[in-house]
Image: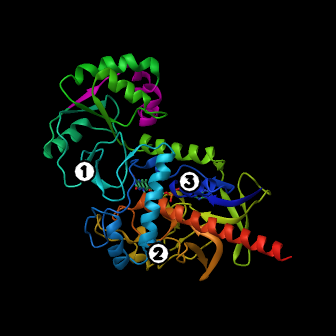
Amino acid sequence: MKFDAVIIGGGLAGLSCGIRLTNAGLSCAIVSAGQNALHFSSGSLDLLTQLPDGRGVEHPLDALAELAIQSPQHPYSRIGKEKVSELALLAEQQLQAAGVELFGSAQQNHYRITPLGHKRLTWLSPTRVPVVKFEQPLPTGKIAVIGIEGFLDFQPQMVADVLKEQGAEVVSHYVHLPLLDRLRENASEFRAINIARWLDRSENMAEIVSELSPLVQQVDKIFLPACLGLESDQVISDLESQLGKTIYLLPTLPPSLLGIRLHDHLLKQYRRQGGIIMPGDKVTKVNFDGQKISQLHTRNHGDIPLKASQFVLATGSFFNNGLVATFDRVYEPLMELDLGNIPPRSQWTDEQFFASQPYMRFGVETDTQLRAKKYGDVIDNLYVAGAVLGGFDPLTEGCGAGVSLISGLYAAEQIISAINNANAATEHTEVAQ
Ligand SMILES: Cc1cc2nc3c(=O)[nH]c(=O)nc-3n(C[C@H](O)[C@H](O)[C@H](O)COP(=O)(O)OP(=O)(O)OC[C@H]3O[C@@H](n4cnc5c(N)ncnc54)[C@H](O)[C@@H]3O)c2cc1C
């Protein structure tokens, strides 16, 4: 099988890269071993919320110059602030074109309300998530935080208490919903996605309305755990119009409905543009021809290689085995690529639990075009994108999704120009002959 590009890993980085490549008319295959970080995420996307020195960031794009001084190894610093600004805008457009409805812009961070009721800075949030503009009080209006009886991942009283401390007018309740009784019998099955599969059925709407209605008479807004609207937002809009109240969703513990919804939109967009995806398959072997990759082998395709002129490594970090740590060694398992500076074992962690943990910055070393290196030499046709990159801490710097989207798009742009240049060179040779 032959493609213009093959991407290893179908998370946020691999998908954003694949969407850009197929949008440019290139043939592209994504091999993706399993679930990705989006299935476990809040559904909100961070661009940059804190500098390494601990200062909070209101305007992410304006902070890139300072980031380059404090953290020259950060992927944004390598890509350059003008390019990052351009690609952040492109990422917003790409998400919108994929049908993902998001609030926010790269010009200014906003706060999203977390599942514990706290405020957390971010770049883009699903429009169903309650948000607060930077340095603004919580919007006025009485809120009902409603939990679902038996659903232990969401504690409405706790959320209400934290919101009250911030000046909001809040009540909290549990709704019983008899239609969930059978599911409730098995606590391990009583999770957000399984609940959504029941609540999303149109025949259950009348019962949801009749159970919720008495609890929300006196309020303006309803905060629910994100347990409905898996396939489409329509069920939530219908519920809103029947109750006459605005409904917001708070992310739950994984699996995350809001993250899965985002993933599904991107995957559909990639497929709509002709992209090939090989879900549940895993790249097991990579063949080199000098400083270039010639082909890949996957678990499911056995002897049939995947050939391409360009490749992207988007395998994620430790969470998805894009990086592996043993007791005293960290390595990239597929090609044993060079990693950035890995300190001695005793310095991998900081004993202060909430400090930036050094191991979060471990990742694959690249040149400024984000091409991987092996034994110090650049691999000409292997670009690296997303969480497998080194030099940043997605947690304390609040930049996880931004790095994935922007490096995925950056890799795509390098590939598009490499292929265009190769085509132009071929045409030139043909004309000369
Ligand atoms: C649990 C969790 C929650 C997070 N929540 C947020 C959040 O709410 N907001 C935010 O901004 N950031 C969040 N992040 C940061 C996150 O890293 C990025 O947002 C981003 O989603 C990472 O995307 P990625 O594509 O780089 O990697 P991943 O999402 O990790 O995807 C990598 C993919 O590659 C596949 N893969 C690995 N090896 C192979 C192989 N050999 N062959 C084929 N496929 C392979 C994996 O199976 C996986 O599907 C979170 C991270 C984690 C771990």
Q: Is mark 3 within 8 Å of ligand 1?
A: yes
| Residues at marks 2 and 3, CA–CA distance in whole angstroms | 21 Å
Whichever of callouts 2 and 1 sits on the residue coming sooner in the sequence is: 2
Q: Which residues are drawn in magenta?
A: 172-200
Q: 20 or 70: nearer the eye?
A: 20
- Label 3: how many Cα within 10 Å (few below 14, some 14–19, many 20+): many
Nearer the observer: mark 1 or 3; the answer is: 1
Image spot of residue 213 (x, y percent): 27, 20
Q: Which residue position is annotated with label 3? A: 15
Quadrant of the snapshot with the N terminus: bottom right
Whichever of callouts 1 and 3 sits on the residue coming sooner in the sequence is: 3
Answer with left or right where residue 387 lies relative to residue 70.
Answer: right
Image spot of residue 385 (x, y percent): 53, 64
Image spot of residue 116 (x, y percent): 26, 45
In the depicted structure, whether residue 126 falls above or below residue 391: above
As shown in the figure, which amino acid type bears the numbered disc 1?
Answer: Lys
Image spot of residue 196 (x, y percent): 44, 31
- Label 1: how many Cα within 10 Å (few below 14, some 14–19, many 20+): some
What is the magenta segment's predominant secondary structure? helix
In the depicted structure, whether residue 174 falls above or below residue 314: above
At a point 70% along the width and 54% down the height, the residue shown is 299
Q: Which residue position is annotated with label 1? A: 133
